[in-house]
Image: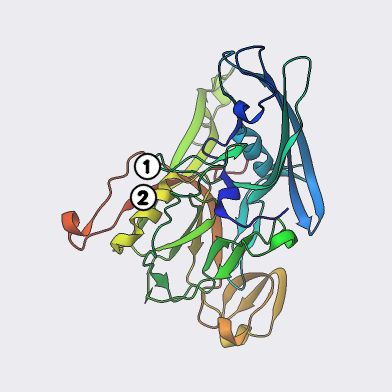
Amino acid sequence: MNITDISQVAFANSPVIIRIDLLDFPTFPIGVNPLTAHLTLITYDIESVGVQTNVTTYTLKKEQASINDKYISFEIQQYLKNDISIKANVPNQEFPVLQYNSLSMPDVKGQCVFFEFQYYITDGTTNSATVSSLNNVATLGYRWRNELTPFYGSYIGSSEGFDYAVAPVKKYNDDINFYIKQEFDFTLGVNVTSSTFIKTIQELQTATICSKEPLLVIYLDRDGLWQYITTFGKVSIDDDITQNSSGKVYRDNFNVNPATSHGENIRIEDVRQNYTVNTGLLDESMNQLIEELLYSSRVYLVRFFGDRFTVAQTGITIDNDIITIDNDNITIDSDTVTVGDIGYFATYTQVPVRVVDSNFAKRTFINDKRDISYFIKFKETASKIKK
């Protein structure tokens, strides 16, 4: 495997097409006999250099729609999405995942899948030589409508049109320690692996702001990479409660105490917490990141509770235990607090959510002056009451 260019990266939340140009097979004239393409698609992870895991093979066959068609194409994005999300060696987990850590870089897993394919055509009597493509990788990113569609196969697509957000001016909370950014690493050559192709880098904080209601929004952007946004405005939280009730019937009401006996059976079915978040004032360059957040298929909220690392905590390694420091309960997971961590938020919770908003009205400096901010509503993806 050798990934050296963006044109080798497939974004599986948009169509990924293998297009076979039949004119590349001159010994199989078009319009004489119906032609059929046989495609073998192989997906896998690379846990260490040269070691493939979670290998899955798909065998596909497709005929010309019309005997005069000059191509046969296969859409393979559904296979790629499935094999990014589900790993045979890690049951009961849907990928990709990010586990935030206030003391170190986050634990990120399962953001891509490598794939290769080979195909040949046949007229029912004779088979062509096999054509192979060995160096491809897919993420859960997507393309805008105006971008050129990269094809794979005998027609090589263009990598133009990948218009990334241009240097968005972010704001950072100076009490949050580890901000990160991600990028594709095209320099690894044959040493590429599932964990190294997408490079996670600590992002240096520039413009820092204090916030009374600190919140970190983490989401998959249009390239399938994790993106961090800090919000500085008001955060409102409410619950959607689903319950069932039915009236009670007693055979003998004489012994029923109306002061202690309920007249209904009540069962709480589901409680979903909602967060209405104001981003605070943003630079106009953040619009694209906000838009990608609203479209994202994987979003986390990290809520901080105001507790900070203190001098009393430095040099202590704590393994999933609750300890008392200055009359506060602090939970720290198998990490050592250093002098460099003093003053940063210590306690937090990470919540998987989805974006509820179905409309995006872009705000600009011309139309809205300096009031470029958004209210975004999130809903937890699991019940607050464990089922």
Question: Can you identify the residue that label 1 sits on?
Answer: 357
Q: Residues within 10 Å of mark 2 (few under 14, many from 20)?
A: some
- In the displayed structure, 367 sits above or below 354; it is below
Residue holding disc 2: 376
> Residue at coordinates 48% horizontally, 76% vertically from top-left?
204
Residue 122 appears in the figure:
yes
Q: Secondary structure at mark 2?
A: strand
Amino acid at pointer 1: Asp
Mark 2 vs 1, N-terminal side: 1
Nearer-the-camera pick, 119 or 50: 119
Judge from the rendering whether residue 237 lies leftward or rightward of residue 28; answer left or right.
left
Q: Residue at x 65, y 59 (%)?
A: 197
Query: Quarter-wise, where is residue 348 in the image?
Result: bottom right
Q: Residue 5: x percent and y percent?
A: 58, 55
Q: Which mark is residue 325?
A: none
Q: Residue at x 49, y 42 (%)?
A: 272
Residue 218 image point, x, y percent: 50, 57
Scheme of image coloration: rainbow
- In-front residue for pair 10/98: 10
Residue sitting at x 50%, y 81%: 343
Q: CA distance from mark 2 to mark 1?
A: 7 Å
Cβ atoms at labels 2 and 1 below 8 Å apart: yes
Neighbour tally class for label 1: few under 14, some 14-19, many 20 plus, Cα within 10 Å? few
Instruction: Determine whether 245 is above or below 132 in the image.
Output: above
Q: Is residue 350 left or right of residue 322?
A: left
Q: Is residue 258 visible?
A: no
Left or right side of 45 for 278: left
Residue 39 percent across, percent down from the top left? 71, 29
- The C terminus, quarter of image: top right
